[in-house]
Image (tube, grey):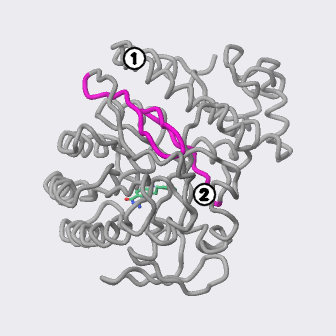
Amino acid sequence: MNNPDPRQQTDFHYRLHATDGAARLGEVVTPRGVVRTPAFMPVGTAGTVKGMYPEQVRDLGADILLGNTYHLMLRPGAERVARLGGLHELMRWPHPILTDSGGFQVMSLAGLRKMSEKGVTFRSHIDGAYHELTPERSIEIQGLLGADIQMQLDECVRLPASRDEINRALQLSLRWAERSKRAFEAQPKGRALFGIVQGGDDAELRTQSARGLIDIDFPGYSIGGLAVGEPQAVMLAMLEVVTPILPKDKPRYLMGVGTPDDIIESVARGVDMFDCVMPTRAGRHAQAFTRFGKINLKNARHADDPRPLDAESDCPAARDYSRAYLHHLVRCEEMLGSMLLTWVNLAYYQSLMAGIRAAIAQGRFEAFKAEVKEGWARGDI
Ligand SMILES: CNc1nc2cc3c(=O)[nH]c(N)nc3c(CCc3ccccc3)c2[nH]1
């Protein structure tokens, strides 16, 4: 197990600096650095934020990255990452890293899955080899990777689902939360394990899940089981049930969310941390996120447009390259097209988070929310 530098042994904790309605401004303090919240966490699935250098991601204002237990356990393997000094060392990212437990990815990526009380067995989508993921093994893997913030193993039910199905998965996840926490005690101090609230779209079950996790007690709480195809209204309704129950002095992480609109509406309902593949994945599909909404650079209307995406952006990819050139690159499927649009999108997401944090600090979050929505509605002129 690679230990963070003992000199940096500061305990994991959350500091609440200001609120504006239910929106919160704060910091998550970890041994490897501080995460300013509300925070957007770029996803580095296989140990890389696709198409970006780590320094570039850092320069955009990202304080923390996500790694994926499922992908890294299959390739290059958790023990190999540990032998190479851990994920921070391997990917040259000295700042905080959060890893998921892998269960969600098993259900969406692996073949031949078998769930039991013990855990889940599955076949790798890469080479068909059999693997087992239990709460204990998931924590061991996350420890070998060296993640600063780790997730319990849980079962995320796809919506729509019956109340019985949602309840069964919620109860299993609570038992796995206990086992994950026990296994986590073997890890070096300073790291944090988050419980994950389940309960689908049922207010009663969401309440039961949150209360059950609080009884077990975690330094932070993830809100799972959402961004799985439900309407935004359902997701927001579940936040209104769950966030008032969760402790105010601990961070709330809404998993897999989301669009800029999802994020700003979720901040308004007390969420501190977000992750989503959207800005990076959209960048590889010719989609640009801007202050004026989304722009599809594949569209022929851009072929002769000499303007940059956003002349006022401080991101060179949005400020210095013409739409005509970006259109050309995506049409030719040149790798620079994906790289520039990924840069544009992550820059936009981080600037949105910086704007949100400043607005909460100044007590003008509602006004800020209205301004950004008005920009998106105005569309691209
Ligand atoms: C896109 N929507 C989405 N909904 C999710 C729900 C859950 C959930 O209920 N439980 C767990 N454990 N993870 C979830 C994830 C994956 C988030 C992630 C991806 C990559 C790296 C690190 C973290 C979700 N993602």
Q: Position of residue 64 (x, y in %)?
A: 54, 43
* The magenta stretch spans residue 34: yes
Which residue is at 19% across, 44% downward? 241
Which residue is at 67% across, 42% downward? 283
Q: Residues within 10 Å of mark 2 (few under 14, many from 20)?
A: some
Q: Position of residue 59 (x, y in %)?
A: 67, 31
Q: Nearer the viewer, mark 2 or mark 1?
A: 2
Q: Is residue 117 above or below residue 221?
A: below
Is label 2's Cβ within 8 Å of ligand 1?
A: yes
Is label 1's Cβ within 8 Å of ligand 1?
A: no
Which residue is at 67% across, 82% downward? 127
* The magenta stretch spans residue 202: no
Residue 202 figure quarter:
bottom left
Q: Earlier in the sequence, mark 2 or mark 1?
A: 2
Q: Position of residue 361 (x, y in %)?
A: 38, 17
Q: Mark on residue 57?
A: none
**What amino acid is labelled 2 in the image?**
Thr
Q: Position of residue 40 (x, y in %)?
A: 50, 38
**What amino acid is labelled 1 in the image?**
Ala
- Residue bearing mark 1: 370
Examine the residues drawn in magenta and state their main secondary structure.
Answer: strand
Q: Is residue 204 left or right of residue 326?
A: left
Q: Could you say whether the residue bearing mark 2 is in a helix, strand or loop?
A: loop
Q: Residues within 10 Å of mark 1 (few under 14, many from 20)?
A: few
Q: Is residue 219 above or below residue 216?
A: above
Q: Mark on residue 45?
A: 2
